[in-house]
Image (spheres, grey):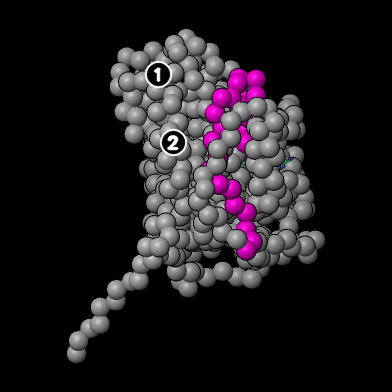
Amino acid sequence: MTTKKHIPKLNFSTDWSYAPAPEGTDHIQLNQSYDLFIGGKFVKPESGKYFPTLNPANGQKIADIAEGSSGDVDRAVKSARQAYEKYWKKMKPADRGKYIYRLARMIQERAREFAVIESLDGGKPIRESRDIDIPLVAAHFFYYAGWADKLEYAFPNRKPQSLGVAGQIIPWNFPLLMAAWKLAPALATGNTVVLKPAETTPLTALKLAELIQEADLPPGVVNIVTGAGETGAALVKHPDIDKIAFTGSTEVGKLIQTATAGSGKKVTLELGGKAANIIFEDATIDQAVEGIINGIYFNQGHVCCAGSRLFVQESVENLVIQKLKDRMETLIVGDPLDKNTDIGAINSAEQLAKIESYIELGKKEGAEFYQSNMPIPNGGGNWCRPTLFTKTAQSHQIVQEEIFGPVLAVQSFRTIDEVVEKANNTPYGLSAGVWTDKGSKIFHLTNRMRAGVIWANTYNKFDPTAPFGGYKESGFGREGGLHGLAPYLKF
Ligand code: NAI
Ligand code: MG
């Protein structure tokens, strides 16, 4: 028998393009509706209300999600308290570690399924959910599982003890990864949890609930209550919560700080950012341009540590801007499930409207506007082309405020003093990047930057061993690494 060779037909008459390379979806299993996960079981919300979660690439409903009320939050907190007293507090730390290792392995085994669901529900390119989000989720569970029985070594002579019940509220930009950042250290330190996923991206957390059942975690150790802001607020207010961990907007972070003041609850907040990415003339320019692109267009700019402000040394300004524009013209905006896609769908219609209003504002403020000419999908969904503003000023709102979309604002500088002053001049202080050939310059500059994480000659690199967190209005407390254990312990 001869095999027929398949030769794909290429159309050279138009611009170059890739054949579609969609990731399959037939291997994933999703229910039509999801209940709350309380006490190890899926239970109906007391109100009987459900809300839809949509696929932001086509606007279609994927599933109905239970809307948790304050009564449901109360049930979940009670179940977490019971599980804490009955099982988790009493369990040998090494055994707690085994459960967390088991979860880590199960996530690895089901990584492909999690990646596809993350991209379907949230709009991020499958390349990212497959290569970044889900592997990091497993890595966080593995890393913190290792600490479970070594807490005395992490904090010598300080007799670390668990707090009790942690309430955790997470955003939609890295849904399962943010769940992992919060669940893994809480469980390793012996706390039980009530987790509230974001209303636009609840599916991977609910799939994780299924794994938690399969892993045979004692019932109530992890509870998942879905819903929107009111559900989150009910969790924050609940009197039997010992600790609140939140990632999201600075606005809600401030509400949480007010609501918990004087309550004795421990709080950590990971809020917004407006990171400066700084290129010196001696940097490897091509590498830096690639890093800038990755820093702002990665995950549609839905990244709290996105490099949304670029500072270029004046002598290389024109060169860098030209290279940025050239590279932007090759970025593919499209189906999140396609492996060629660089920029997926904007997470929600509300977020797209916010980004578009900032783009209009930037034009009005007098900055020079540039958008790539690549096609964007038509026929539903929320899309935004990679956008660049040059000739911006410190006073522009597009330079001061978090846009949370694929929009980069560029300024030039001459000296280190000048760029440090400009880079630090925002209400935020989450992250920054510096690109230079000189190690001494890196140390000189980074010591003066008010940012929790600073990358040198790279950007947006994460590792479970590295602490992450902000200065100023970017929040307080650290997640990740040894530092990430302390917020879940008392001494
Ligand atoms: P958000 O802060 O409202 O949502 C984050 C989480 O908090 C969600 O789970 C939400 O249901 C919950 N929440 C909302 N109101 C709450 C309340 N009063 N008490 C307790 N929990 C509450 O963020 P949103 O509205 O989705 O996005 C708005 C802006 O926030 C974005 O444009 C972006 O600038 C910023 N943001 C920053 C994030 C980060 O990683 N730092 C993540 C998400 C948004
Ligand atoms: Mg969704």
Dominant SS type (magenta) = loop
Q: Give the side of residue 389 with respect to residue 484, left or right.
A: right
Residue farthest front in this picture: 13
Residue drawn at (60%, 19%) of the image:
394
**Which residue is denoted by mark 2 in the rendering?**
324
Residue drawn at (56%, 59%) of the image:
377
Say few, some or many: other residues with alpha carbon within 10 Å of mark 2 (under 14 / 14 to 19 / 20 or more): some
Q: Position of residue 242 (x, y in %)?
A: 64, 37
Which residues make up the magenta segment? Answer: 379-403
| Residue 477 visible to the viewer | no
The answer to which quarter of the image holds residue 416 is top left
Residue 85: in magenta span: no
Residue drawn at (55%, 49%) of the image:
175
Quarter of the rendering occupied by the N terminus: bottom left
Which amino acid type is marked by label 2? Leu
Which circle marks residue 315 in the picture? Answer: 1
Gap in angstroms between the C-alphas marked 2 and 1:
16 Å
The answer to which quarter of the image holds residue 285 is top left
